Amino acid sequence: MTDSKTLVPEDFFADPSGRVFNDRLYIYPSHDRRTNIPDDDNGSQYDMADYHVLSMGEIGGEVTVHGKAFGVEDVPWAERQLWAPDCAFKHGKYYFYFPARDREGVFRIGVAVSDTPEGPFTPEREPIRGSFSIDPAVLVDDDGEAYLYFGGIWGGQLQCWRTGQFDPDAYSTMEASRDEDALMPKVAKLSQDMKSFESGVQDLIINDDIDGKPIRAGRHDRRFFEAAWMHKRGGKYYFSYSTGDTHYIVYAMGDSPMGPFTYAGRILEPVQGWTTHHSIVEFRGKWYLCYHDTSISGENNLRSAKIRELVYDDQGHIKLAQPQA
Ligand code: FUB
């Protein structure tokens, strides 16, 4: 299968994180909903209030929309905007990572726990200590160590954390200036119980393949914007992400889960709709790209999750995919 398949045409799910548990493909998406909030550069229009997990026994087969995993009312610290989540399995439990704005309007990352991959999940009472910004993605490496990747500029508030403290006055700068190094995504090693950061939060350095130096903020077609994702194939680490206002999904390759990484190219050309957000997952010996677009609604905040096959060349580079309506 190389054609894209819309997973749930009758509802709106975005930011699809694909995970395989018990030989079944699970998708952990945002659950878009209609609002009267106008589009702005903060992403205020993405005002999601709950999560549902999707699953399927085979690609192209029936997609199950599981019952509510949890809602914003179940998260004691969160006020609004349940954005792009991810899920990991360790020591017999499923850990669901998600961003939301706290009562001061600051994005934090929380974790919710379940005995089953579809939930319901029970959120911890507090966000992960030391967490900030959006779009958590987790890698449980072959040695059992787990890492959380996160961050997003503009509405994702990463520009407010340059000093290590939240600076609301930095919000409107959106990102670093053109000739500076771009703001890099963040990585932290997770503790054995998967509920806290074992190490401090570090930059995940992405170097340009042209000069070997960190990608500059002016390279809007390459610099990190949001939608962090890490996968491993053939001993190599692949970090992929959205370039935001240029609307590409791109990737970088490295030899360590903590970086550094080197820019390696584009994965997906712009889809219909402002945001582009993806995941990459191996299922029964084939690799798949999960992503979303607005081909059904025509509205930026009502997105449809899709899946299509992902193809590598003989050198392990990912072949560029064209979006399909
Ligand atoms: O779904 C809300 C936000 O839109 C996500 O967190 C971003 O990655 C973008 O897809």
Image (spheres, rainbow, N blue to C red):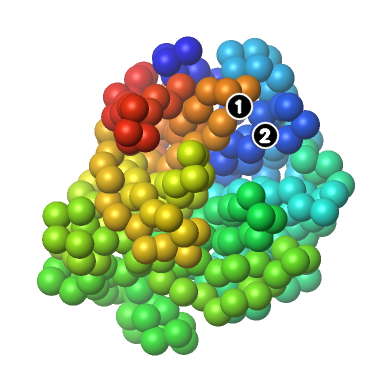
Residue at the (64%, 59%) spot, across then down: 146
The residue tagged 2 is 20
Residue at the (66%, 55%) spot, across then down: 143
Q: Position of residue 175 (x, y in %)?
A: 27, 69
**Is label 2 within 8 A of ligand 1 (CB to nearest ligand atom)?**
no
Q: Is 307 placed left or right of 177 in the picture?
A: right
Indicate which disc residue 283 carries. 1
User: Residue 219's image quarter?
Assistant: bottom left
User: Residue 69's image quarter?
Assistant: top right
Q: Position of residue 190 (x, y in %)?
A: 65, 67
Q: Are marks 1 and 2 in contact (CB under 8 Å)?
A: yes
Label 1: which secondary element:
strand
Residue at the (46%, 74%) spot, across then down: 202
Answer whether residue 158 is visible to the viewer in this image. Answer: yes
Indicate the amino acid at tag 1: Phe
Residue at the (47%, 64%) spot, across then down: 258
